[in-house]
Structures are given as structure tokens and as C-alpha cells.
Image (spheres, helix red, strand yellow):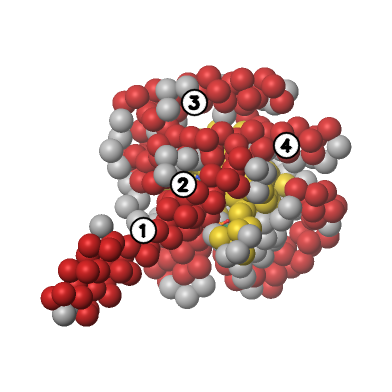
Amino acid sequence: HADAAMYQAKKDGRGGLHFYRAEMNRAAEDRLRLAADLRAALHRGGLQLHFQPQVCPPGKTPRSPAAGPASMSLFGVEALLRWRHPVLGDVSPERFIPVAEEAGLMDELSNWVLEAACAQLAGWRADGIDVPRVAVNLSPRNFQDPGLPARVRQLLDRHGLRGDQLTLELTESAWIDRRADSLDKLRALQALGVGLAMDDFGNGQSSLSHLHRLPLRQLKLDRSFVHDIEHLAVAQTLAAAMLHIGESLGLIVVAEGIETAAQAAFLIEHGCPVLQGDRYAQSMAAEQIGPWLAGLASMAAADVGASRSDH
Ligand code: C2E
Ligand code: MG
Ligand code: MG
Ligand code: MG
């Protein structure tokens, strides 16, 4: 207990230990408070989704390399959680997702995200804004929930969406302990037409075996990997090889975190069908997607130019 530890430390005259324990308690308290605030935000409308566009380069669609429109086109958007804390300001999902997991909030949080993302996609489409699909990030524990496929089916029905208009992104850590029942859930989702994406591939414990064992539709190249393309020959070699492997396995490869013309040029040159990153668009509020989409065709020309002039 905090007071007991502090008292003991004082009595023993161990200032360092006292300080260390007090710090640990403070960190634990901060997490508890953050979890309570997150729960309140979830229940009182304090969370938002932002959306980051994913684009196909000119002349390309993910399934047919030469049949796409002459300009850049929209493949879909990824939903990303945003939380503006009343005191702390914007809190990154990298910080609050682990808090949600620890606090047992992940099922509720993911259900909220799924609902909000599908409602938004239906809303865009009702407004004549042609967003082909939305991607939602799920946590490993969401795939332990036996009700997930049934809830996803109800969600799609309720919003009048087809399965292929929803992508679920999963990180590899979900499959470190590959569980048969998780695999069943993935197959049930696949049967609904829902696309499954392996997120952050190439970061951490990437396992090539997942690529053919899991019923995946997309492979997302991690942004650290994309970043290094510019500086490291080995990253170029690996990126080109991953594109080839993904294509050979019939997966749609999505490169994330593209920031520079050189990264874009390399990936386009090597046939990457879907591009995502700040170079094209940062995540934005739902109402900004329509105006952004209206400017997409003109952005395309600039990138094709960049791609050609670099080679
Ligand atoms: P992620 O799924 O890999 O999402 C991509 C992250 O990279 C996003 O960070 C995005 O804003 C950022 N990003 C995109 N393009 C660029 C770029 O060009 N440069 C750089 N430096 N960053 C870029 P964000 O929104 O902070 O989210 C971080 C992570 O938090 C996500 O990584 C995802 O793992 C998790 N996350 C976000 N929203 C959700 C959610 O609704 N549910 C769950 N379970 N996790 C979420
Ligand atoms: Mg993701
Ligand atoms: Mg990622
Ligand atoms: Mg990530």
C-alpha cells in the first residue's frame, strides 16, 4: 500500500526506494484515473473517429494492375480513434488503448468504433460521397469474443453494408498464441465477405507463416519499414520482396506511413496497389473526407510526375 511503503521507506531512511515506490504508485494511479476518464468519455460521447484515406496509384486497382482510372483513386479509409481529454488535451491511442485493455474496456470500445465507423460509411454513401470501404483496428482480445462474427453481421445489416465494405485490421501479436477458436472467428468473418488485414507487418515478430495460415485479404507494410526505404538498400530489397510475396499470395498490399515523394515513387514503381500516409492525407474528421476526395484527381498528377522524374 502506498502509505505503508512510504512510511517504511522513511523509517529505514531509504530515500531512493521511497521515491521509486511513490513514482510507481503515481504511475498506477495515473493509469487508473485515465481508465476512469476513458470510460466516462466512451459513455458520454467524448471519443471521435478520424479517418485516413488509402489511395490507389493511377492506372491501378488492387485486383487489376492495368485497369484503374488514369488518376489516383480512393481505396478506402482507416478509422482511427481520437480522444481529447478535458485536462490532458489530445491523448494518443498508443497511450490509451493499453489502458483500455488493462481496464477491461476493449470490447465496449471496439463495439463503439465498429458502430461509429459503419454508421459513417453509410452516411457518406447516403450523401453521395463514394468511400468504398472502411477499416477498423481491433485488439487481440476482440477475437476471443465468441459473439464477434454475429455482431458484425448484425452491424452490416443494420447499416445496409456489404461485408466487403468493412476491413478488420489485426496486429500480429494477436497470433503469437495462435488459437483454433480465433481462427474459426476469422473464417466466420471471411464468410461474411469482411476483409481481414494484417497490420504493422514487418515490425516486431513478423511471421511469414501467418500469411498463408490466416484468411487474410490485406497485408499492411509497417511504417518503420516504409520509412527506411529511403535510406537503406536492405529495406528496399525487403519491401520489393514483400510486395512480391503479398501479390503471389493474392493479398492486397497496403503501404503505411508514406511521407515522402521518394518513398511513394519506390512503392509505385514496384507495383504497390494501395498507399497510405501523410504524403496523401493525414487522418481527418468525417466531414473533411468529401472535400478531400474532390481534390484527389489533381493530386494524382503530381505524384505520377514525382514517380517518373525519380527514375
Ligand atoms: P495503426 O493501425 O498502424 O495506424 C496507423 C498509425 O500511423 C496512425 O496513428 C496514423 O495516424 C499514423 N500515420 C499514418 N500515416 C502516417 C505518416 O505518414 N507518418 C507517421 N509518422 N504516422 C502516420 P494513430 O492514429 O496515433 O494510431 C496509433 C495506433 O493506435 C494504430 O496504429 C492502432 O494500432 C491503434 N489504434 C488507433 N485507433 C484504434 C482503434 O479504434 N482501435 C484499436 N484497437 N486500436 C486503435
Ligand atoms: Mg491499423
Ligand atoms: Mg499499422
Ligand atoms: Mg500500429
Q: Earlier in the sequence, mark 4 or mark 3?
A: 4
Q: Amino acid at mark 2?
A: Ala
Q: Which mark is residue 121?
A: 4
Per the image, label 1 sits on a secondary structure element best described as helix
* Residue at the image position 51 percent from the left and 72 percent from the top: 230
**Residue 225 quadrant:** bottom left
Per the image, label 4 sits on a secondary structure element best described as helix
1 or 3: mark nearer the eye: 1
How many residues crowd around disc 1 within 10 Å: few (fewer than 14), some, or many (20 or more)?
Answer: few
Please give left or right for residue 262 compared with residue 145 in the image: right
Inter-mark Cα distance, 1 to 3: 31 Å
Q: Earlier in the sequence, mark 2 or mark 4?
A: 2
Per the image, label 2 sits on a secondary structure element best described as helix
* Residue at the image position 54 percent from the left and 40 percent from the top: 109
- The answer, for residue 295, to whether it is visible in the render is yes
Question: Residue under circle 2?
Answer: 100
* Residue at the image position 64 percent from the left and 48 percent from the top: 47
Q: Amino acid at mark 4?
A: Leu
Q: Earlier in the sequence, mark 1 or mark 4?
A: 1
The residue nearer to you, when weighing 25 against 157, is 25
**Image coordinates for residue 279, horizontal then vertical, percent:** 66, 65
2 or 4: mark nearer the eye: 2
Question: Residue under circle 3?
Answer: 148
Q: Earlier in the sequence, mark 1 or mark 3?
A: 1
Question: Residue under circle 1?
Answer: 28
- The answer, for residue 297, to whether it is visible in the render is no
How many residues crowd around disc 2 within 10 Å: few (fewer than 14), some, or many (20 or more)?
Answer: many
Quadrant for the N terminus, please. Answer: bottom left
